[in-house]
Amino acid sequence: MERNFRFEKRKYVIIGIVFAVALLFIIRLFSLQILSDDYKQHADSNAFLKRVRYPGRGIIYDRNDKLLVYNQAAYDITVVMKEVADLDTLDLCNTLGIDVDFFRKRIGEIKDRRLNPGYSPYTNQVFLSQLSAEECALFQEKLFRFSGFYVQKRTIRQYAYNAGAHVLGDVAETSKADLEADEYYSPGDFIGKLGVEQAYEKQLRGEKGVEILLRDAYGRIQGNYMNGKFDENPVQGKNLTLGLDIELQMLGERLLEGKIGSIVAIEPSTGEILCMVSSPSYNPRLMAGRNRGKNHQMLSNDPWKPLLNRAIMGTYPPGSTFKTTQALTFLEEGIITPSTLYSCVGGFSFRGLHVGCHGHPSPLPLIPAIATSCNGYFCWGLYHMMSAKKKYGSVQKAMNTWRDYMVSMGFGYALGIDMPGEKRGMIPNAEYYDRAYRHSWNGLTIISIAIGQGEVTATPLQIANLGATIANRGYFITPHVVKKIEGEELDSIYSVPRYTKVRKEYYEEVASGMRAAVTGGTCRLANLPDIEVCGKTGTAQNQGHDHSAFMGFAPMNNPKIAIAVYVENGGWGATYGVPIGRLMIEKYLTGTLTPEDEVLATDIQNRRINYGKQER
Amino acid sequence: MVSRKDNVIKTLDWWTVGLYLILVLLGWLSICGASYDYGLPDFFDLGTRAGKQLMWIGCSFCLVFVLLTLDARIYDTYAYLFYGIMILVLLAMVFNPTDIKGSHSWIVLGPVSLQPAEFAKFTTALALAKFMGEYTFSLKRTRHMITVVCMILLPCVLIVCQKETGSALVFLAFFLMLYREGMTGAVLFSGVCAVIYFIVGIRFGGDVLGDELTSAGDFYVLFLIVCFSILLVRLYCKEYGRAVSYMTLVCVGGMLLGLLFSLYVIPFDVVQLQYWICGGLLVWLLVLFLRSRIYRFLFIMFFLVVSVGFSFSLGYVFDKVLEPHQKTRIEVLLGMKDDPAGAGYNVNQSKIAIGSGGFLGKGFLNGTQTKLKYVPEQDTDFIFCTVGEEQGFLGASLVIILFSAFIVRLILLAERQTSRFGRVYGYSVASIFFFHLFVNIGMVLGITPVIGIPLPFFSYGGSSLWGFTILLFVFLRIDAARED
């Protein structure tokens, strides 16, 4: 093997470099650790501590600028174990109103590293959290006697009304998953959970600031570094104004007391949500402060599932409210004209298939068919559409055409409301039926979708949005809860109209039908003296007692409110849906209820539906 | 089999193994210190960092056993295969969706995260050793030299693509090995010059001399370029001593006179004058070359031109090529920016922690700075500051001395190899350890910029420990078989 002796002496150069670097390091260490007192003093007396300055979370108002959610000061009492000296335990306990056993237990918990993995006797440990100003006042005065104890100011969310819990949502300490998902958060930070608090977390939370403090080697704070030259102030969270009318919301929650169901009201011209009731509800104050964990546990174990926001997460058969969509589709597709008559003697009977109906004259044209909620009329319509081979070529194509109409009206997909957890409901298509019936199906097989039964399901929000679409005569604006963000534009999707596939003139026909339902059809109870209400009942068949539904808007011209009411197992649409719809519309448009209607409201409030003990 | 194993035990370099064991043990104790939060010392609990590291160490020992049992010849035989596989893995990692702190270099397998880049050093070292160990190989052949540089740069570029700049820089260590193997020292000299130009240029980039006409950074850099060029003439063309004297007089004198003139008589941009002087020097060197036909003059001219070009592009590279956080780190290191809340925080904290250690340190587990979590990454990249704080000057110096002894021992082992394959590999190993030591401890002491690479055997983490263990013991295995 060739040995190149010329280069072998280069090993001395390399070894020399190694020694030079080692020497350099040792000299540097010598200067840092022995020569210079600078850093030593720094460590003995001064070391940086970055402390976060928390911004105030944004405030939430309703559409009339009523304060809904705000921040209240709360206090944590913390303790640094190494600094506790000559503690008069009895005095401390008396001041805080706790007993000595609790004190010992709490201290034990803090020191137990299994319960408190981040424990260090040199750093602040939370001893008691979220005390009110009153609870803390006396303690604050005597603080000098309890060395090692500190008071730390925090805020908790406060709710002005016991209403709207689902819409508002709440804040909770960040979970492990939250911490991993977003670097902004550190353990102990709060983050919005559910509702607007979650959907607008980025706007509400603001920007944390930072303070650079000097601490000594025992963690005691000596002051701000360079008089706060490098500190950053927190940026307050942005305030939100909701489209919600809190008075209307409270009435809705009152009316649904003891019932399972939902009410959604939308301002048709803007798509703003006026109220979003999901019953059973809960007091939002339960989710703030010290007992959140316990209360959350209790609510999640409730068999009626009060935490579920049924307005956007419950999917139900829309029942007869869905007939309006059918009328619109058949008109636009030329299957019927407003004067087309279909016979209905006790229902739809064809080739051995029977869909029942109730007593009304026969045959009927479109407007009375909507007014009386004739099952036969819409079953015939769908049957004719699905059988129109000449027009569509096959039942599959007819089916998918139908599906496109439903989707254009906001069904089958989540609408895109600014709330987490919205469900999409279900609009079947041809492929779905091909799979379910192995390609052997026709209009009759699927006839129940014409009356909002069978495979079709929708959220109460989608039903209310249907009301808004008819109110607008052919378009809707994506429903949204937040009307205004302080200093920021709303997402543009909440201002753009989304047109359906049906032209305006047909909407006028359907609106007339809904008006007729109020003046002389199934919704007579919704007929208010000075307001032209349009409505459509729904009675959705169901295993067990029928669901009661109502969809409507008012006034007929230049509508201000569109509404959907859905009461699980409420029976006929007229039993719960219509009177609740009436009261809500009256309240919103006139600002109050007449004395007679107040009696009606109290009556509905006190009515109970027997749901049994079954898990909902 | 048995006889070979006996053989390994007899011929294994136990000095190195001993140093390895001491360093691993000290490393583990430092991790105990860094991750320990007052209370029960539960270092053996697998939930803690110390406990996990103990597990990694245990795995490393198993790895050592396996590596020593294997035949040394397989490393020679499969060197290219290992290299190829690693390149494929690194290529795949570029498209790895897992993102840990902006880096795509981690493979997450349940509770274990692996960083293939840590093992790429080993495969590259092996492939280089194999290639350079060929009988026909010569660094003087351009084609061979280019192949070698490409073999180093390929994994390096792939690692940069995974956003692990620190790990990629480690591949520069191979140039130290190339220097030993005969690469001209001018490369190292140029590298050092580039670093000096960079530091001087950036440090004084914003300053001006006199009446704001002359940029201080440009002036200093050009001054250095001229001085270095003349120095090269002096070193490599010794018979031209007279010319050197003239050059020094004319060029350096001219620049200084120009500066004085600008400062006290009529202000003008001295940098312009410097460019003229550089041009003049270039012509002078050309004349010398034409007269003597000594090609070294051409190289020195080349050095001069490239240096001036480098000084031109300096500002651009700094502003446009570097990421903002890298820029800030360099500015903080050069003392141009005080940023205690951001880039300077780690280094400042680590200097304070070390400074507070004093001569004897605060004692094992008694470091208050590290306990209070002042130093971020204190059990990974900044582990050395725990040593500094708890063991003081004495302990920290001892660690540095142990590391130096370890590296020097590796160099001596590399020198005693009978094959070039072994020597190249050994030097690669020594260079890599040296680079890690230099950059990591330099960073903790505030000498080098903050580059996130681990301190071998000390920093917490399975990948790096295994990577270094493989790197080392493959060499020891090759060394043990050198007489075969």
Image: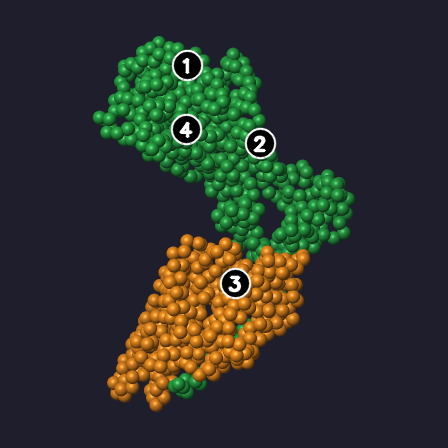
* The chain in orange: B
Label 2: chain?
A
Q: Which amino acid is tagged 3? A: Gly
Residue with the mark numbered 1:
A522
Label 3: chain?
B
Q: CA distance from mark 4 to mark 3?
A: 54 Å
Disc 1, SS: loop
Marks 3, 2 in one chain: no
Tint of chain A: green
Task: Find residue A195 and report its horizontal and vertical position in percent.
Answer: 49, 35
Q: Is residue B223 visible?
A: no
Residue at the outermost top position: A361
Task: Find residue B142 and report its horizontal and vertical position in percent.
Answer: 30, 77
Q: Which amino acid is tagged 1? A: Thr
Residue with the mark numbered 4:
A457
Considering only vertical position in the picture, is B379 above or below A143?
A: below
Task: Find residue A348 and report its horizontal and vertical position in percent.
Answer: 35, 17
Q: Quadrant of the N terminus of chain A?
A: bottom left
A43 sits left or right of A184 in the view = right
Mark 4 neighbour density, 10 Å: few (under 14) some (14–19) many (20 or more) = many
Task: Find residue B374 and report its horizontal and vertical position in percent.
Answer: 58, 58
Disc 4, SS: loop
Q: Is residue B338 visible?
A: yes
Disc 3, SS: helix
**Picture quarter containing residue A379?**
top left
Residue with the mark numbered 3:
B462
Marks 4, 3 in one chain: no
First along the sequence among labels 1 and 2: 2
First along the sequence among labels 2 and 4: 2
Judging depth in this view, the residue of B197 and A257 nearest the camera is A257
Q: CA distance from mark 1 to mark 3?
A: 74 Å
